[in-house]
Amino acid sequence: MSTLEQRLAAIRKASEKNIPEDAQKIMHRVTEELQSAGLAEKAIGEGDQAPAFALPNQDGTIVSSDELLEQGPLVLSFFRGHW
């Protein structure tokens, strides 16, 4: 059975085959810029409470985190798109 770190390393390696090289360069450059700016230290961490927000759902309807939390726990997933 592999560890989480091993599984993540395998996913990163596989993504290199699926993401175009020019897109990878942009992603790596932007990641370095964000790290250099110190934004990672300001990000909320596991177990932290996220600030309230309102975003469009898949249908374009604005949905607030407060409305969703009234229905139960909330999980956010960020989808970067297809390659």
Image (spheres, helix red, strand yellow):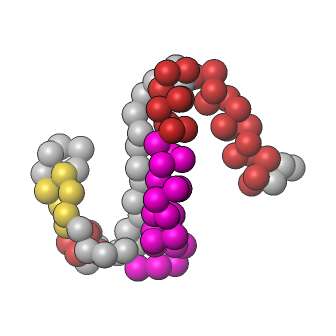
Classify residue 4 by image quadrant.
Answer: bottom right
Residue depicted at x 66% and y 37%: 12
Q: Residue at x 17, y 43 (%)?
A: 59
Tally of numbered discs: 0
Q: Is residue 40 magenta?
A: yes
Q: Residue furthest left?
A: 61
Residue 3 drawn above or below residue 72:
above
x and y percentages locating residue 23 in the rendered image: 47, 26
In depth, the one of 73 and 26 nearer the eye is 26
x, y percentage for residue 18?
A: 57, 22
Q: Is residue 9 left or right of residue 41?
A: right
Query: Hey, which residue is sitting farthest front in the picture?
Result: 36
Tell me: 25 left or right of 58: right
Is 62 placed above or below 19 here?
Answer: below
Q: Nearer the viewer, residue 39 or 4?
A: 39
Q: Position of residue 75 (x, y in %)?
A: 42, 63
Nearer to the camera, 61 or 34:
34
Residue 74, image x and y in percent?
38, 68
Magenta-highlighted residues: 30-49
Q: Residue at x 13, y 51 (%)?
A: 61
Please give left or right for residue 13 compared with residue 42 in the image: right
